[in-house]
Image: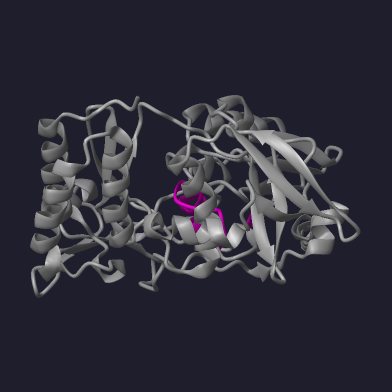
Amino acid sequence: MEHEVSLEDRLWMVGKMFAMVERYFAHWEDSRIRPDAWDDRYTACLAEAVRSSTRREFERMMQRLVADLGNRHTWFRDTSNLRGDLGLRLRRLDGSWYVVRSAHAELRPGATVVTLNGRAPEKWMEEASPYMRSREERLREEEWQRVIPALLDDDLWTVELDDGLRRRTVTVHRTRPDSRKEMPEARWLVPDRVAYLRVPSFASPAYEEAAVAWLTRVSNADALVVDVRGNSGGGTPARLIRSMMDRPWPWWTEFAADVGFLWLRSAGEGEFSIRPDGSGAIWRPPYEQPEEPVFRGRLAVLVDRATGSAAEDFVMPLLVTKRAIVLGETTSGSTGQPVICQRAGFSMGVGAIRASLPDGRAFENVGLRPDVFVEMSPDDLSSGRDLALALALELLASTG
């Protein structure tokens, strides 16, 4: 039997969420809800909250609200029940869905997925639609794969595969969060000359510490490839950035609806201005100055559409200052400083900062465009060929 959420807690959380959005939300241009319709939505949510007594019902109601706000740094989730995920990532290429990454030995990259628990991926994507915050199709193709495991409790998933000759099914267990799988992976690509560092996540300070430790070990290498494909963020890796920067670098231009909130972030540094209509403030931070970098060699960074948030914080200064060659796909396009509140085992966050590139160009829901675009193909996946890495090695060699 599902646990209930008290009426007091439900009404408190609805009121708190709406108050936080009214004060801090910095992304109305991406929202399906107009600011002048916010009060009407509040009234409707109060009525629905009264009817949604179980944790699952209440969470889903609030997640539909969050989805309509259209910002990936605004959320509502039940932190008392972390359901994990399917342990694989799919990509739609040429109309079919292929395994890109997998935690299951029986599901190798390049395999074509026809159905999951008897339903085509497109159908799962359609079911996830009311809960997805992304607007762009390429990002929605990623997001449904996080939404569906969070909506359902199924522990076993039957995956139907098609290898072109026959179809077969594989049954896999849902994977639980495991911090060990998120630790950086490091190795030499060319002994003592070209190093490789893959950072799957910045969700723990330990991941950044491990990455900096590897930089120290390879500090005399000629070149380094840093792979943040699939890294959806965590905490901004300021120490890792500083370990690589040999030149001054900028930060995002930031907008906030709450002027005082942004003024405290600025600490009085850089350029600070209030919009003429009073709708918020804009802060252009001063350039950061390099210290003694750990690594001074040539640098390439690999990104994809799943590279987001703190991983984009990492990539942006390397890209705009030309410190690194960036290869891969356009990144996710979402970063910021959410205001967070917790109650009754639920966590809610509101995206309070809207970032632009240092020169003012749009970033949110646009992403960082790489220097070299590398398109993924079914043949590369099935053969195990990493075209982005191969091109990075070629370009690093040519600049040596």
Determine if residue 360 is in view. Answer: yes
Q: In this rendered view, identify the residue nearer to me: 270 or 259.
A: 259
> Residue 9: x percent and y percent?
14, 32
In the image, 208: left or right of 103? left
- The answer to if 79 sits in the magenta stretch is no
> Residue 248: x percent and y percent?
46, 55
Question: Which quarter of the figure is the N terminus placed in?
Answer: top left
> Residue 141: x percent and y percent?
55, 61
Question: Which quarter of the figure is the C terminus placed in?
Answer: bottom right
Determine if residue 315 is in view. Answer: no
In the image, 48: left or right of 235? left
> Residue 291: x percent and y percent?
48, 42
For image coordinates 16% across by 37% down, the residue present is 10
In the image, 227: left or right of 165? left
- The answer to if 318 sits in the magenta stretch is yes
For image coordinates 26% across by 55% down, the residue present is 65
- The magenta-colored residue range is 302-319
For image coordinates 57% across by 66% down, the residue present is 330
In the image, 159: left or right of 338? right
- Quadrant for residue 326, please give it: bottom right
